Amino acid sequence: MKFDPVALDAAARPAWPALRSIDIDGWDVRLSGGYTGRANSTTTTGTGALPLDERIARIEAAYADGGQPPIFRMPDFTDPAIGHALDARGYAPLHRHSLVLAANDPARNDEASVRITHAPDMAWLDTHAAADGVPLEQRALHDELFRRTPLPRLFAAAYDGAAIVSVAMTVLVGDLAVVQGVGTLATARRQGHGRRVMRALLAEAWRREARQVVLQVSATNEAAQPMYDALGFDPVYRYAYRKRG
C-alpha cells in the first residue's frame, strides 16, 4: 500500500502534544518552552483566508507573546511560495532534518523481557531522558509532554536483567500507530535492545487493531536506519525547520 504523505502527516501530528496550540488561519502554532521541534513550531500545511505575509506576521506575534522565537516546520510537500515568503523575511533552514518512515506489515512479536504499560513511570522517563540526552533544564518539559500524549497509547520498556535499557511508545490514531520516543541507553546500543522493544510494541499495537505504523527519525541518525530497515519501514517524506537568522 502506498502512503499519502499529506494525510500521514496530518494524522500523526496530534500524537505529539504541545503545552499550547493556537490555530492561526488554519495553521497549528505550537509553543512548549523549547523542548522538541514538533512541539515548538508551526507546520506549513493547510490553507487559510489571509494573505500569506499577514498569516506569517500573526504567527510571529503569537510567538513573541509566548516568549519564543518563531520556527516553521516544513514538510517537503510544502507549497514553494511559503518557502519564498519565509526567505524574504530572513528565515534560514536549521540543521535538523527528519525522515518520516512508515510500514504496513512491520516485523513484530512478543518479547518476554519487554514490559508494556499505558502511562510512563519515572523509570521509563529517566531512561528516555538519558538515552536522548535531555538537558536538565528541559527535563520537566520532557516529562510533561510524554505524560500529555493522547490516549490510547502504549509505553514499552526493554529490560536487560533488572534494568531498563531501551524504550519506545506509540499513540494509536484509528488504525495508525504513531511511534515516538524510541531510545536506547548509550551503554546498551548495538545489542538488539531497540529491535526488541520495537517488535514488542508493534505486536501489542497490532493486537489493538493498528494496521499501519509511522515514525520520524533524524535524517542524520544513520545508526538507527538498519534497525528500521529490518523492521520493514520505508521512507515516505522529509521535513525541516526554518528559523529567522
Image (spheres, rainbow, N blue to C red):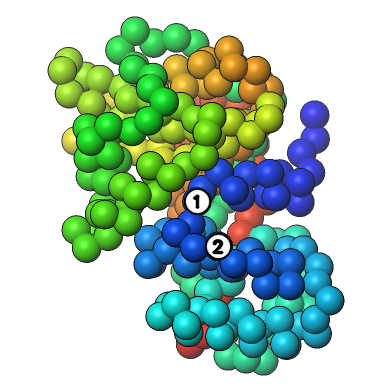
Q: What's the CA distance linking mark 2 and mark 1?
A: 9 Å
Q: Residues within 10 Å of mark 2 (few under 14, many from 20)?
A: some
Where's residue 23, x and y in %? 65, 67
Amino acid type at image mark 2: Ser
Residue 100 shows in this picture: no
For image coordinates 59% across by 17% down, the residue present is 208
Asked which secondary structure carries label 2, the reply is strand
Is residue 141 found left or right of 87 in the rendered image?
Answer: left
Q: Name the image quarter holding residue 35.
A: bottom left
Q: Name the image quarter holding residue 169.
A: top left
Residue 61 shows in this picture: yes
Q: Is residue 222 above or below residue 29?
A: above
The residue at which mark 2 appears reads as 21
Rendered image: mark on residue 55: none
Contact between labelled residues 1 and 2, with CB atoms less than 8 Å apart? yes
For image coordinates 57% across by 36% down, the residue present is 178
For image coordinates 22% across by 63% down, the residue present is 137
Q: Is residue 134 above or below residue 47?
A: above
**Viewer-nearest residue: 118 or 222:** 118
Is residue 14 found left or right of 54 in the rendered image?
Answer: left
Where's residue 47, x and y in %? 81, 68
For image coordinates 17% across by 15% down, the residue present is 161
The residue at which mark 1 appears reads as 17
Where's residue 100, x and y in %? 60, 46
